[in-house]
Image: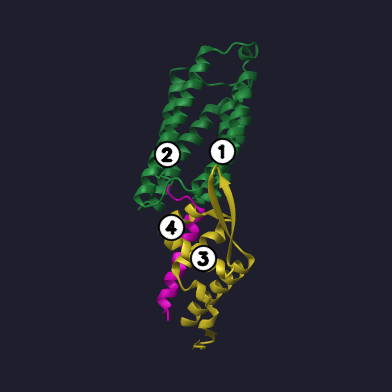
Amino acid sequence: MKEEKDYIRDIVAMRSMMERSSKFLSLSGLACIMAGVYALSGAFIAYKIFHFNPDKMVDESIQSGSLPSGFLKVVFLAIIILILAIGTAIFLSYKKANKSGEKSWNPTVRRLLINMAVPLIAGGLLILVLIFKGFTGLIAPFTLLFYGLALYNASKFTFEELRSLGLIETGLGLISSYFVEYGLLFWTLGFGIVHIIYGIYLRNKYER
Amino acid sequence: MKLSISNISVNDFHKAFESRIRLGIMSVLAVNDVLDFNSLKEYLNITDGNLASHIKTLEKEKFIGFKKSFVGKKPNTRYFMTKEGKKAFDNHLSALEKFIKSQK
């Protein structure tokens, strides 16, 4: 017959099995910090070198049909930052999953990604529309807003802290859509500073 | 046989749940609506044969059910927890809880 400690071990095993099969816990805190660093450097380059700081909701030169070359450079820069951030996240999470003997591509990851993808793709398409209609001032606020919604949606399938991170990003997005002239500043705060703080927090809490 | 530990009996523990692997299968299916064989295998980290025999035991008890479908030409079996399975699993959990409490 089983003894008390066997039953306790049963409970521990069941708990870990439920958690492992419903939450993706190999997200890397360092990846979050790195995403923040990329965002900070990107915002710096856009502001200092490309002199990008939209202070109005609508850019009339785009509405008249021509995209200014400085603007295209900023879009290109943004895409590079996005690829760097996602690449780092995939690489570091893959390493972390391998270290803990977990498969990095399992049903939990797929669910996490699908739940993030819906708000992100909707937001991305909306932002493309905004670019072609000349609403450049709303691009930064809307990236924050939809990224925040994606995190909030995904938080059920990974660390629960992502929920509050999602709410903060959504809030920053909403506020900055009113104060359009500070759009780049809010973007730097949301994607740069907040990511770095959260990354350090996740590292301290889960990777010790 | 009815061995009594304080006021609960070992009969409250279903014997299908004596194996930790079967408990694992039930735990995973409690939080995932449906899962295919390979996903179950990944989570439990056991061999095909071992998993198949434990699944068979749980199927015999009617605790889990399956749906067969095809992905391309490959057959794909997806498992889920039945209502009876859910009830038995919940009973087992509360029996465990009672047992641990009675030991304190």
Q: Residues within 10 Å of mark 1 (few under 14, many from 20)?
A: some
Closer-to-camera residue (B97/B67): B67
Task: Give the magenta range.
Answer: A1-26
Q: Amino acid at mark 4?
A: Asp
Q: Secondary structure at mark 2?
A: helix
- The disc placed on residue A90 is 2
Residue A172 in view: no
Q: Amino acid at mark 1?
A: Ala
Q: Which residue is mark 1?
A: A117
Q: Which residue is mark 3?
A: B56
Colour in which chain B is drawn: yellow
Q: Which residue is mark 4?
A: B48
Percent coordinates x, y for residue A51 in the rendering: 48, 17
Vertical comparison of B71 with A192: above or below: below
Assess whether mark 4 and mark 2 are in contact (beta carbons under 8 angstroms).
Answer: no
Colour in which chain A is drawn: green
Q: Amino acid at mark 2?
A: Ile
The chain holding disc 1 is A
